[in-house]
Amino acid sequence: MTILIENIKKLVLTEEKPCKFVSGKAMSELNNIDDAWLLIRNGKIADFGSMNNMEKTNLLFKTEEVKVIDASGKLVFPSFVDSHTHLVYPASREIEYVDKIKGLSYEEIAKKGGGILNTARKMKEIPEEELYKQAMQRLDEIIAYGTGAVEIKSGYGLSTESELKMLRVIKRLKQDSPLTIRANFLGAHAVPAAYKGRQTEYVDKVINEMLPQVAEEGLADFVDVFCDKGFFTVEDTERILEAGQKYGLRGKIHANELDYSGGIQVGVKYNALSVDHLEYTGDAEIKVLKNSETMPTILPGAAFFLGMVYAPARKMIDAGLPVAMASDFNPGSAPSGNMQFILSMASIAYRLLPEEALYATTLNTAYAMGVSDKLGSITRGKIANVFITKKIPGIEFMPYAFGSNKVETVILNGEIVKRELC
């Protein structure tokens, strides 16, 4: 299909020379085109420019059928990229939320048998087909809010059988959904109750039993570890990342959500693609991240839902770091995959300019899931994952109007995708 979107009020985040990610002060410098057009052909972004010079492209349209969309008064953005989710799960955990309201901490709920271990028990019981259907419904919902790519982690299995079940579901979602999807093996999400007091033995199981089967079936693009207080140690994390490298799986780390855990340092040491959460990030962590190839990724939804301290995003950007922001969509600590809300949180809670927030939820998150060469900006040759807004005043309205869906039309892989909110 060939699509021409014309009379665009503003075409947002255009790149003539593509870059992998944007850091520091450059995050506030967004390239846009007013009164623009965008040409999509064969699933890719073919060309774009100002309506003033669209005459020179007329020859491109004479010999082909073109669907023309009038975007007068509307903005066109690259689709959001959500580089951190756990959206394949068997059931919600709203009952635990009452414990949160009563003041119980994340660790206290986990000690009561709630949290990740609660979901792991239900994961064992749910049929694979039902798990797939529920996850597909969630994918439809995030598409409607403007997400075009998503990373999905395992980690609610905590047994070889259940972890493989989750990853096989993610593989099916990759095949059946128009979203660009990456799979992340997170066998080290928590220590199962059966291994209490025998954490090293469970790490052995992840390395010697789970990883080989995951690799043999080609079920994961990355390997992840929850390196934090009360979960896995730096030493555990090093062992798992080293094992993952042997199978060609690059690391991504849950780090410093609950304390200064050393997770950021070990992530950089092993060239992790991203370190995620980062509520506890100080000068030492910022220093080690600088000039690394590891993307600092903040998860505003989890910090908001759990009432935690917010990661120092403003300080990180001012120090010259790039920052990405993702949803952490999961049943226990961030039960929402709405990246428009994450965009708003970036400005409301973390004091990012709208331009910085957009980079954090598009190009930089694309880098954090290894797809910034294909997605995250309006660039010739990239996959045509874009959305057209309703009529809105400007870019600033996107984070400002945090309670409404501003997306009117979604285009994924160059095709118009019609999705209704569930």
Image (cartoon, grey):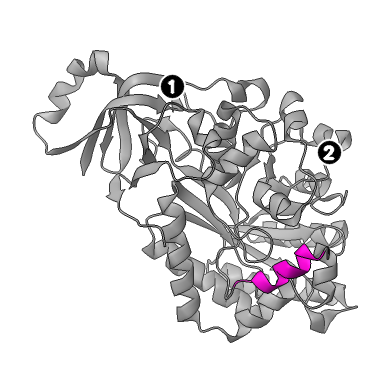
Give the residue at mark 1: 32
Task: From the top left corner, tell me how far across and down residue 96 is, in percent.
Answer: 72, 71
Q: Residue 215: horizontal and vertical position, in percent?
A: 59, 67
Q: Is residue 388 magenta?
A: no
Read off the residue under disc 2: 285
Q: Residue at x 57, y 75 (%)?
A: 90
- Residue 98 lies in the magenta stretch: yes
Is 382 on the left-hand or right-hand side of 192?
left
Query: What x and y, as percent, mark residue 363?
Result: 53, 36
Q: Determine the CA span between mark 1 and mark 2.
A: 33 Å
Residue found at the very far bottom of the displayed protein: 125
| Secondary structure category for the residue under label 1 | strand
Q: Amino acid at mark 2?
A: Glu
Of helix, strand and loop, which mostly describes the magenta segment? helix
* Residue 158 against residue 61 in the figure, above or below: below
Q: Nearer the viewer, residue 282 or 198?
A: 282
Establish if 200 lies above or below 23. Answer: below
Q: Amino acid at mark 1?
A: Asn
User: Viewer-nearest of labels 1 and 2?
Assistant: 1
Q: Which residues are magenta?
A: 92-102
Q: Residues within 10 Å of mark 1 (few under 14, many from 20)?
A: some
Determine if residue 332 is in view: yes
The location of residue 66, given as percent across then percent down, is 15, 37
Q: Which residue is found at the position 75% from the left and 75% from the top?
A: 114
Residues 40 and 121: in front is 121
Which part of the image, by quadrant, shows the C terminus? bottom left
Q: Nearer the viewer, residue 203 or 386?
A: 386
Please report whichever mark, 1 or 2, sits nearer to the chain's N-terminal start.
Answer: 1
- Determine whether the residue tagged by mark 2 lies in a helix, strand or loop: helix
**Counting other residues with Cα less than 10 Å from the Cα at mark 2, is it few (<14), some (14-19), or many (20 or more)?**
some
Marking on residue 18: none
